Image: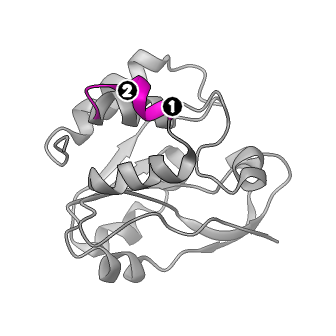
Amino acid sequence: MLTGLPPVWGPATRVVVLGSFPGVASLAAQRYYAHPRNHFWPIAATLLSPDPARVLFLDYLARCEWLVRCGVGLWDVYAACERSGSLDSAIRHARVNDFALLASCCPSLRAIAHNGTESFRHAQHTALLGVPVLKLPSTSPANARWSFDRKLTAWRAALAEHLTPP
């Protein structure tokens, strides 16, 4: 059984991005979206910073602190699962995270953004939090049908009313 990563959020978090479960690279590094071809960090930096290159140069902890200052949190729908490799289709015997914890830790929550289809399968549970639930295209390199620009456009449109750069 694999165990996921702890949440990244704060009391001022307005949007929580929920992935499905960390991939092999992320689990090994103990960092969200650690695969070098995952588009999450470049998309977040482009949407939330006038200087995306500066954000991408930061180490992981500094990036997380920056993200929380921007009102964005990170977590996954699964707390634990069995899986060989990184594909969502290989997830077995998954244990879902406690979404009530999310609501109590993030009193400023305005939206839940599901990063990909597997995460969005749990939208009926996150909708119980009483905030808009958004389905975003996966930033994973496995979602190769979507270019970076296409993903960026979709994320920008979905998050525009919920986020404002600091």
Locate residue 44 relative to residue 144 in the image: left or right. left
Instruction: Assign a secondary structure to mark 1.
Output: helix
Q: Nearer the viewer, residue 145 or 111?
A: 111
Q: Which mark is residue 90?
A: none
Q: Is residue 157 left or right of residue 85?
A: left
Q: Is residue 27 above or below residue 164?
A: below
Whether 81 is drawn above or below 161: the answer is: below
From where the camera sits, is residue 62 visible?
yes
Q: Secondary structure at mark 2?
A: helix
Please name whichever residue, 15 or 146, is drawn nearer the observer in this view of the structure.
15
Q: Nearer the viewer, mark 1 or mark 2?
A: 1
User: In this picture, which residue range is highlighted in magenta?
Assistant: 49-57
**Where is 19 relative to 97, above or below?**
above
Residue 72 locus on image (x, y percent): 33, 54
The label on residue 52 is: 2
Q: Residue at x 25, y 26 (%)?
A: 50
The earlier-in-sequence mark between 1 and 2 is 2
**Which residue is drawn at the image coordinates 69% and 49% (left, top)?**
26
Quadrant assignment, res 99: bottom left
Q: Is residue 117 magenta?
A: no
Which quarter of the rendering shows the C terminus? top left
Three-letter amino acid code at the position of disc 2: Pro
In the rendered image, which residue does mark 1 sit on?
A: 57
Q: Give the main secondary structure, helix, strand or loop, of the magenta stretch.
A: helix
Residue at left offset 24%, top offset 60% = 14
Quarter residue 43 falls in = top left
Rendered-image quadrant of the N terminus: bottom right
The location of residue 148, given as percent across then percent down, is 47, 19
Q: Amino acid at mark 1?
A: Phe
